[in-house]
Image: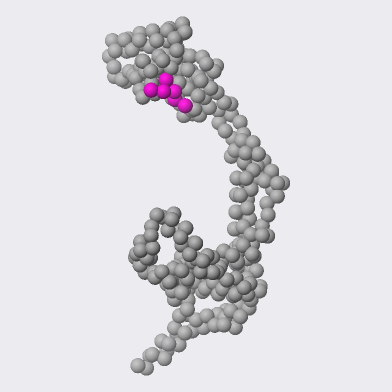
């Protein structure tokens, strides 16, 4: 019984004040457990949790000072969108919340806080972040290598499979067949029709089409043979570990760089997100503290 007052004093120990309002050890522990707020992660230790709680208090004060009010209809729309996205009804939502130890009322309070904070950030930060065309241009030029497109070819083939350990007579038979088909193509036979009839893989259904292939993605003998062909030309049978291939180059694109016009929106969004993140961190760690009186208690 004699230890009870000491215990109460430790639990209610004041760690800091925000605009004169005390923050106690008990509040920090409750905050760490996600009580009356979001579950907090990534803030190890008492000092980290205290700092997070101070920031939370400061944001609550800013929401109040700015007169930000979230209507029930906004929360309904927010939850409705979540239910639609996850294809669940109200009963399933409540069951899912219950499994996480949450009530619907508690969840709505959490959503209200999130919307309030988002609106506050929009007022305080988003409107002050801007990315100029010059910044986009500089980023593009500094990271030009990231926007390169490698050389690629559109290939079709007719393959005659030869097992690695195939006997000489099998190799000779496959070679004779491949050379015969090659001669017929050179004399004017349609490559796609020949592929449908003779190729020994599933590409025959599409006339031997292999699609666009980047340099380095092909088997070396095929890449070497394709490199010597112009668009529309056909190679003599080429031997690989798979077998013999008759290669046709259907198209070719040289290595190049994507144009800035194609990347402008992507780069601008990337720079905007980075600037927003930096501005948000500064707002949390500096601006908010300057607007309010935060005092740590020794």
Residue 168, given in percent of the width and then of the height, sits at: 29, 11
Q: Is residue 206 magenta?
A: yes
Bounds of the magenta span? Answer: 205-211
| Above or below, comparing residue 153 to residue 97 in the picture | above
The residue located at (63%, 78%) in the rendering is 293
Task: Give whichever of 5, 103 is nearer the camera.
Answer: 103
Q: Quadrant of the C terminus?
A: bottom right
Total residue callouts:
0
Task: Give whichever of 150, 273 is nearer the camera.
Answer: 273
Residue 41, given in percent of the width and then of the height, sits at: 46, 65
| Above or below, comparing residue 4 to residue 180 in the picture | below
Q: Which quadrant of the view contains residue 137? A: top right
Residue 254, given in percent of the width and then of the height, sits at: 58, 26
Q: Say whether residue 3 is left or right of residue 49.
A: left
Residue 148, given in percent of the width and then of the height, sits at: 59, 35
Residue placed farthest to the right in the image? 134
Residue placed farthest to the front in the image? 73
Q: Quadrant of the N terminus?
A: bottom left
Residue 151 visible to an observer of this rendering: yes
The residue located at (35%, 10%) in the rendering is 177
Q: Which quadrant of the view contains residue 161? A: top left
The residue located at (59%, 65%) in the rendering is 119
């Amino acid at each position: 019984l004699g230890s009870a007052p000491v215990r109460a004093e430790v639990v209610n120990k004041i760690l800091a004040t925000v605009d004169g309002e005390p923050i106690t050890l008990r509040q920090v522990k409750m905050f760490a457990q996600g009580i009356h707020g979001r579950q907090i992660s990534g803030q190890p230790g008492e000092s980290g949790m205290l700092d997070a709680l101070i920031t939370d208090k400061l944001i609550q004060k800013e929401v109040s000072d700015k007169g930000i009010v979230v209507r029930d209809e906004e929360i309904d729309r927010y939850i409705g969108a979540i239910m639609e996205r996850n294809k669940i009804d109200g009963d399933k939502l409540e069951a899912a919340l219950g499994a996480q130890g949450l009530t619907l009322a508690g969840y709505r309070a959490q959503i209200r806080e999130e919307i309030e904070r988002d609106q506050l950030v929009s007022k305080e930060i988003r409107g002050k972040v801007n990315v100029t065309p010059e910044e986009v241009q500089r980023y593009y030029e500094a990271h030009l290598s990231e926007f390169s497109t490698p050389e690629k070819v559109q290939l079709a083939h007719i393959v005659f499979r030869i097992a690695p350990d195939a006997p000489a007579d099998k190799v000779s038979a496959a070679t004779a067949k491949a050379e015969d088909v090659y001669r017929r193509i050179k004399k004017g036979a349609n490559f796609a029709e020949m592929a449908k009839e003779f190729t020994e893989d599933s590409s025959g259904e599409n006339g031997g089409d292999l699609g666009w292939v980047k340099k380095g993605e092909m088997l070396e003998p095929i890449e070497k043979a394709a490199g010597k062909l112009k668009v529309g030309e056909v190679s003599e049978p080429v031997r690989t570990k798979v077998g013999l291939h008759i290669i046709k180059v259907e198209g070719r694109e040289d290595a190049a760089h994507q144009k800035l016009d194609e990347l402008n929106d992507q780069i601008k969004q990337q720079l905007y997100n980075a600037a927003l993140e930096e501005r948000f961190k500064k707002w949390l760690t500096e601006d908010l503290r300057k607007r309010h009186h935060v005092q740590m208690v020794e």
